[in-house]
């Protein structure tokens, strides 16, 4: 059906789409096609040889929190745990997070930090693109009519990674600032991605380069000054706005604090529970 | 989880009688999801109604063209202001709010028209198809401009709803120590979970209507609805639909008149139900307020005088603004003695969402100001905040700044002392260490967001105490009516008391069982086929409707005793109820109460009135209030000073309850009230920018979740109030009032530990940026 008409609305968990429909922000004109029972979209695989993990678009947050996946991409499991309530995590999918492409989508900073790729399928075949190209703007993606997100592929990285999110409530809250930090020991690089501080997820090249060159990769430690500088550079990389959820000033400040704290967790032998040191 | 530290309600009361906590009759159904809320009520052949609302805060309506809506299949009616047959406006205190905007709209969300159609989707399309042309006007969004007269009147009644001064004692008195501040309270929503919904069933011939409605006060609704429909009151019958919370938001008319108008016009049953977004527009909210306050005290911290200027933004229509303002100004001293005062209060009209009743009703706003002042005073006098409060604590016989003596039991010092005696949390920051030795992130500020490590966190402690008036004020006779009938040994109670979740349906049978000694007590339908019970608000139903049920049961009991006395040759005056028996103590004669009533029918109706109160004179002097209750709160809060996130760890409270008639219900009120106080302290606020609501949904209007709500440790201070019919005080509002300042004080305390200075935090809700930037 997707191949034949371009007025199809795809529905995965429905946790974004149904809210928009119920609020009258969206009125499907054509058929609504539920994709979340398609077995291929619901599965994931770990390619040890390639060192990659491929996650079907309809894998839910609850499934991403399962230790089998969580040990491979801990930051994605942490991000998943911050999403909504258990009910939302049971229904909501990574593909839906991408499809909505909100700057506050919690899965997205992790995908961006890991340089994940997104695979899209249509009648004319499949194409794969970096997630940073997939995300075009606030709730705008590179999906063409007739295309479906099938899967996301990301590297299994050796090194500490983590995700932190600020909301004005201790759970079940939309991010007003979020940060993912990944340490890649093999490549000796640091990657940082920020949510809710720009039209899409932002990477922070200056901050990444600064910290990568100041981390002692043998002992996995960094001087306090360098961590401070890292936080400042992350704040500088943000492009937040002021809205009813928060001020731009606070958002800029918060991503810097989060980045510094995450980096410190990586550089401290004993990380927080659930995260490999 | 609440730990009740101690309660005097012990002993031998039989289960189901007063002092015990029987299961709620509606409890199982509510938990299992089978309870019929008003949104679940339907009727055969019923149509749906929907409302068209203004998108502008202030605009002139140039024209309304319904023709496109009529083109839609299934549209049955379109009505506007022109179709209101009776009074065009309604309102609780002054009738200034139109059923539909006629010439002007005064807030975003004001009803302009309503439609009825075969189904909700057709209604939605019809609403979209209604073409309204507006001439946009310059909105009044600044309360000070309303006072200054800088904006032309946005309503024929003017931009000032009420201005009231209080001058008490020596207005020129001064103290050795002076502290002052300006405090701001944001607009809070009651956020009940059961959205507004109603079903109207017209009488044949359109001579009357029956409305099934979730409300707080059936009779007041009826009076306002009948006036607007142009029908006599007895042609309008109201039946309480299942209410999913109220908190003040159901005191005013919302969809009542619209639903009845559509049903009468079409001679068919009509249902209306609001969405969450519509609910934010469809009911009144807690007033945002700006309060300047100055305390004068002796060097040791004894209050000499308070001065205050309070400005309450009432939004577009008056609702209960004038009464909310009077609560705030008359309770400005808090639960403390204060010989001199000059207080100036304003409730003004703006093009914001209308504000009215919400749990705490004016006392909340005042309390945030006076409790913050008490902490500042303690600091200025170098006195411990607890000692300062006890030093100034009000006692029975002290007077308000209006000159009214406080005649009730007033255990203010006990509330504070007992709160202080409650144990502090024994868990460290982040909770007991997890198996791996780390903290439980869910117990740190930021929770699931994993924003903090335990080393980032500072713990603070803060205090709050408050006074709340119970029942209605200013010469209002908010009486209640109840009927008690015994037939075949079964008691049936009838009243119009709105059960909004507070548990009167549990309490009323407890009263009957205790008074009559009969266990089988049933409840008749809650409707207008009996006299008024007054509103389920102002912490008043246990006192007022409890008083009425008690009086009706006592009247029946007197009849039973007469009957028993005459059939057994006893003196009715000497009989008593002992458990389920009627006894004559002197002789040891006893008979089971059910047996004693066999074959007899007794039926009595009673009204309960509280003693009259007075209005305020031009100097704000008078005895406006009926009764008072007190409470103290201690908050322990973990704060992340760098990110501005908080986790409330524990609330301790000792509350003056008079007598705990149903201890579990009291705890329920304490926990729920604290959750709402916590919400106001750290997250709940309706944001309006240029008169447009920006967060009218639960994605952005944040309510505390399970992870935000801390354990509560509570002590019930039980000193039965001789002025209360059952010794019990209202308990619904006090928990909300001083929990808010206590939490904010704890945040200040934590921040002070960081740099020795801290942050003033003069505004609630406290936002992360207020803490860390
Ligand atoms: C109460 C609540 C709390 C929430 N909390 C959070 C939160 O904390 N963090 C967060 O990030 N999000 C949150 N969300 C939003 C939502 O849950 C997530 O964005 C989720 O990932 C959406 O997934 P879904 O499967 O439900 O998507 P759907 O709603 O089914 O779809 C979302 C969009 O993606 C499109 N789509 C879905 N699948 C595909 C596909 N395979 N190919 C192409 N397009 C597709 C749909 O057409 C639609 O446009 C919350 C939502 C609710 C209702």
Image (tube, rainbow, N blue to C red):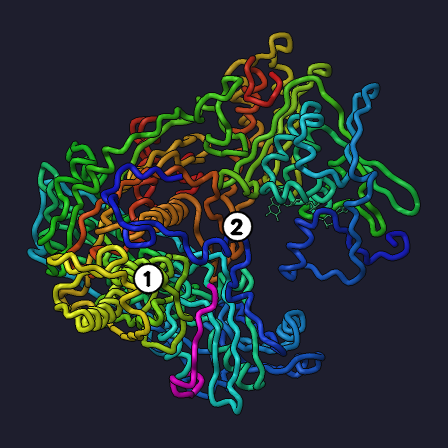
Q: Position of residue B543 (x, y in %)?
A: 25, 61
Is B550 magenta? The answer is no
Residue for point 39% across, 58% down: B247
In the image, residue B486 sits, relative to residue B724, either above or below, namely: below
Q: Is residue A136 left or right of residue B697?
A: right
Q: Position of residue B580 (x, y in %)?
A: 28, 57
Q: Is residue A120 left or right of residue B192?
A: right
Q: Quadrant of residue B563?
A: bottom left
Q: CA distance from mark 1 to mark 2?
A: 39 Å
Q: Is residue A169 left or right of residue B9?
A: right
Are discs 1 and 2 both within one chain? Answer: yes
Task: Quickly name the residue at label 2.
Answer: B700
SS label for mark 1: helix
Q: Which residues are magenta?
A: B228-242
Chain under callout 2: B
* Front residue of B12 and A72: B12
Q: Earlier in the sequence, mark 1 or mark 2?
A: 1
Callout 1–callout 2 Cβ contact below 8 Å: no
SS label for mark 2: loop
In the image, residue A9 sits, relative to residue B72, either above or below, namely: above
Q: Residues within 10 Å of mark 1 (few under 14, many from 20)?
A: many
Q: Residues within 10 Å of mark 2 (few under 14, many from 20)?
A: some
Q: Quadrant of the N terminus of chain B?
A: top left
Q: Quadrant of the C terminus of chain B?
A: top left
Q: Quadrant of residue B134?
A: bottom right
Q: Mark yes or no: residue B609 visible.
A: no
Which label sits in the foreground, 1 or 2? 1
Task: Quickly name the residue at label 1.
Answer: B508
In the image, residue B14 sits, relative to residue B552, either above or below, namely: above
Residue for point 84% across, 47% down: A147
Is B239 magenta? The answer is yes
């Amino acid at each position: 059906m997707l191949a034949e008409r371009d007025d199809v609305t795809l529905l995965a968990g429905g946790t974004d789409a149904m809210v928009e429909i119920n609020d009258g922000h969206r009125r499907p004109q054509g058929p609504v096609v539920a994709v979340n029972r398609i077995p291929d979209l619901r599965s994931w695989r770990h390619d040890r040889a390639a060192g990659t993990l491929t996650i079907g678009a309809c894998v839910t947050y609850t499934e991403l929190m399962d230790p089998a996946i969580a040990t491979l991409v801990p930051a994605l499991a942490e991000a998943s745990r911050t999403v909504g309530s258990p009910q939302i995590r049971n229904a909501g999918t990574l593909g839906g997070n991408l499809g909505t492409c909100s700057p506050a989508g919690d899965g997205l900073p992790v995908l961006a930090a890991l340089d994940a790729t997104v695979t899209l399928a249509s009648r004319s075949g499949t194409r794969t693109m970096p997630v940073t190209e997939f995300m075009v703007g606030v709730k705008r993606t590179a999906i063409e009519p007739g295309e479906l997100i099938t899967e996301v592929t990301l590297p299994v990285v050796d090194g500490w990674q983590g995700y932190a999110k600020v909301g004005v409530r201790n759970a079940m809250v939309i991010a007003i600032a979020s940060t993912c930090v990944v340490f890649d020991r093999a490549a000796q690089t640091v990657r940082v991605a920020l949510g809710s501080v720009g039209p899409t997820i932002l990477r922070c090249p200056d901050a990444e380069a600064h910290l990568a060159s100041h981390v002692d990769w043998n002992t996995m430690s960094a001087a306090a000054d360098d961590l401070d500088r890292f936080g400042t550079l992350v704040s500088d990389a943000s492009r937040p706005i002021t809205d009813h959820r928060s001020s731009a000033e606070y958002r800029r400040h918060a991503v810097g604090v989060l980045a510094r704290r995450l980096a410190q967790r990586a550089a401290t032998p004993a990380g927080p529970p659930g995260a490999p040191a | 989880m609440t730990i009740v530290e101690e309660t005097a309600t012990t002993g031998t009361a039989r289960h189901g009688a007063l002092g015990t906590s029987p299961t709620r009759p509606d409890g199982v159904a509510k938990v299992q999801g089978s309870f019929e809320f008003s949104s679940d009520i339907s009727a055969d052949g019923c149509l749906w109604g929907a409302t068209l609302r203004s998108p502008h805060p202030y605009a002139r309506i140039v024209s309304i063209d319904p023709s496109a809506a009529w083109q839609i299949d299934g549209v049955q009616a379109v009505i506007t202001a022109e179709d209101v047959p009776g009074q065009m406006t309604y309102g609780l205190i002054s009738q200034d709010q139109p059923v539909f905007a006629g010439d002007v709209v005064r807030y975003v969300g004001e009803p302009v028209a309503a439609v009825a159609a075969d189904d909700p989707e057709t209604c939605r399309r019809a609403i979209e198809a209604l073409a309204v042309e507006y001439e946009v006007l310059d909105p009044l969004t600044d309360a000070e401009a309303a006072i200054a007269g800088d904006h032309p009147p946005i309503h024929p009644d003017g931009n000032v709803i009420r201005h009231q001064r209080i001058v008490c004692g020596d207005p020129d008195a001064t103290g050795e120590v002076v502290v002052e501040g300006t405090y701001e309270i944001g607009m809070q929503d009651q956020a009940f979970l059961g959205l507004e919904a109603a079903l109207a069933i017209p009488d044949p011939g359109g001579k009357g209507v029956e409305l099934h409605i979730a409300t707080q006060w059936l009779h007041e609704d009826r009076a306002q609805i009948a006036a607007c429909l142009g029908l006599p009151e007895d042609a309008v019958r109201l039946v309480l639909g299942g209410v999913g919370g109220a908190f003040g938001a159901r005191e005013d008319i919302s969809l009542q008149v619209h639903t009845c108008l559509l049903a009468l016009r079409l001679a068919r049953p009509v249902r209306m139900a609001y969405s969450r977004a519509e609910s934010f527009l469809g009911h009144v909210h807690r007033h945002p307020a700006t309060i300047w306050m100055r305390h004068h005290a002796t060097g040791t911290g004894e209050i000499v005088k308070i001065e205050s200027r309070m400005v309450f933004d009432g939004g577009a229509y008056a609702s209960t603004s004038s009464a909310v303002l009077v609560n705030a100004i008359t309770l400005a001293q808090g639960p403390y003695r204060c010989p001199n005062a000059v207080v100036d209060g304003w409730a003004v009209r703006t093009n914001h969402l209308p504000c009215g009743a919400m749990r705490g009703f004016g006392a909340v706003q005042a309390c945030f100001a006076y409790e913050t002042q008490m902490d500042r005073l303690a600091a200025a006098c170098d006195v411990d905040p607890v000692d300062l409060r006890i030093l100034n604590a009000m006692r029975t016989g002290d007077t308000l700044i209006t000159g009214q003596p406080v005649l009730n039991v007033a255990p203010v010092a006990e509330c504070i002392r007992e709160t202080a005696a409650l144990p502090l949390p024994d868990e460290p920051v982040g909770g007991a260490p997890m198996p791996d030795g780390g903290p439980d992130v869910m117990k740190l500020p930021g929770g699931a967001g994993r924003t903090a490590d335990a080393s980032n966190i500072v713990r603070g402690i803060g205090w709050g105490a408050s006074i709340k008036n119970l029942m209605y004020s200013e010469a209002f006779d908010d009486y209640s009516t109840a009927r008690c009938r015994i037939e075949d040994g079964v008691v049936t109670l009838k009243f119009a008391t709105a059960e909004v979740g507070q548990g009167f349906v549990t309490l009323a049978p407890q009263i009957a069982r205790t008074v009559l000694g009969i266990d089988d007590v049933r409840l008749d339908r809650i409707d207008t086929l009996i006299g008024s019970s007054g509103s389920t608000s102002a912490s008043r139903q246990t006192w007022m409707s409890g008083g009425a049920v008690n009086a009706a049961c006592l009247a029946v009991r007197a009849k039973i005793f007469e009957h028993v006395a005459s059939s057994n040759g006893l003196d009715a005056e000497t009989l008593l109820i002992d458990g389920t028996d009627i006894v004559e103590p002197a002789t040891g004669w006893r008979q089971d109460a059910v047996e004693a009533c066999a074959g007899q029918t007794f039926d009595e109706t009673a009204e309960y009135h509280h003693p009259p109160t007075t209005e305020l004179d031009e100097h704000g002097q008078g005895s406006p209030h009926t009764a008072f209750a007190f409470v103290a709160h201690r908050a322990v809060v973990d704060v992340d000073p760098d990110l501005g996130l908080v986790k409330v760890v524990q609330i301790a409270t000792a509350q003056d309850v008079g007598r705990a008639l149903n201890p579990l219900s009291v705890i329920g009120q304490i926990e729920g009230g604290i959750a709402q106080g916590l919400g106001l302290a750290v997250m709940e606020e309706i944001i309006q920018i240029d008169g447009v609501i920006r967060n009218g949904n639960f994605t952005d209007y944040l309510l505390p979740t399970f992870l935000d709500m801390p354990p509560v440790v509570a002590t019930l201070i039980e000193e039965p109030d001789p002025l209360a019919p059952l010794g019990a005080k209202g308990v619904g509002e006090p928990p909300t009032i001083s929990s808010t300042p206590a939490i904010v004080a704890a945040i200040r305390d934590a921040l002070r530990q960081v740099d020795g200075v801290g942050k003033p935090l003069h505004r609630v809700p406290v936002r992360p940026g207020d803490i860390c930037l």
